[in-house]
Image (tube, grey):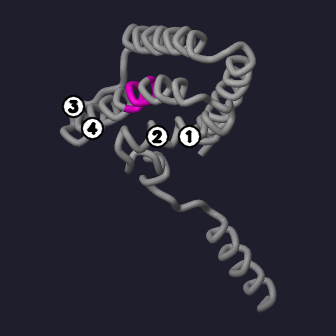
Amino acid sequence: MKQLAILLVMLTTVSMAAQRHDGPKMRKGPKMDMTAEQMATLQTKHMTLALDLTENQKDQVYKINLEKAQFRKEKWAEIKAAKESGEWEKPTPEERFEMENARLDRQIAMQEKMRTILDTEQYETWKKFSNRKKMHGKKKMQERRRR
């Protein structure tokens, strides 16, 4: 009987220790602590390493990345302010459609800009890289829903 009790205590302890307790900081993401300029600089350097960009291309890609980072920071700040004030509500299906439509329009515009900046080989590499990143993000979202 003692051994059974000890075994149950051990199993309970192990199962509790195995749970993930990251709390609210888990959703925040490490990049939201950075400024838009820092995020754009890091993204441009990652792209320079992956695509072997020229100086002219680096400058153009930095401008695009800066615009994207500033937009993300603004949206994140709006949502955070709305949640803190208690005014945030789940978007309606129409609002979701509008947001998704706007997001896809931004992605198409980004793709067109990148097509003009990069040569054919670089563009194909960038497409593979960005698709892989999208799939990784989808997996992360699915993991979040399961919890």
CA distance for labels 1 and 3:
38 Å
Residue 35, given in percent of the width and then of the height, sits at 35, 44
Few, some or many C-alpha atoms within 10 Å of disc 3 (few <14, some 14-19, many ≥20)? few
Upstream in the sequence, badge 1 or badge 3? 1
Secondary structure at badge 4 equals helix
Q: What's under tag 3, amino acid-wise?
A: Glu
What residue is disc 3 on? 87
Amino acid on which disc 4 is placed: Lys
Q: Which residue is mark 2?
A: 41
Instruction: Please say if 80 is above or below 60.
Output: below
What distance separates the C-alpha of mark 2 from that of mark 1?
A: 6 Å
- Report helix, strand or loop for mark 1: helix
* Disc 4 versus disc 1: nearer the observer: 1
Image point 34% across, 31% down: which residue?
Answer: 70
User: Start and end of the magenta stretch?
Assistant: 64-69
Q: Nearer the viewer, residue 14 or 104?
A: 104
Element on which disc 3 rests: loop
Precedes in sequence: disc 2 or disc 3: 2
The residue wearing badge 1 is: 45
Q: In this view of the protein, which residue sits in the foreground, 129 or 3?
A: 129
Q: Is residue 67 magenta?
A: yes
Q: Nearer the viewer, mark 1 or mark 3?
A: 1
Q: Position of residue 127 (x, y in %)?
A: 68, 20
Kind of residue at badge 2: Thr
Please name the residue that numbered disc 4 is placed on.
Answer: 83
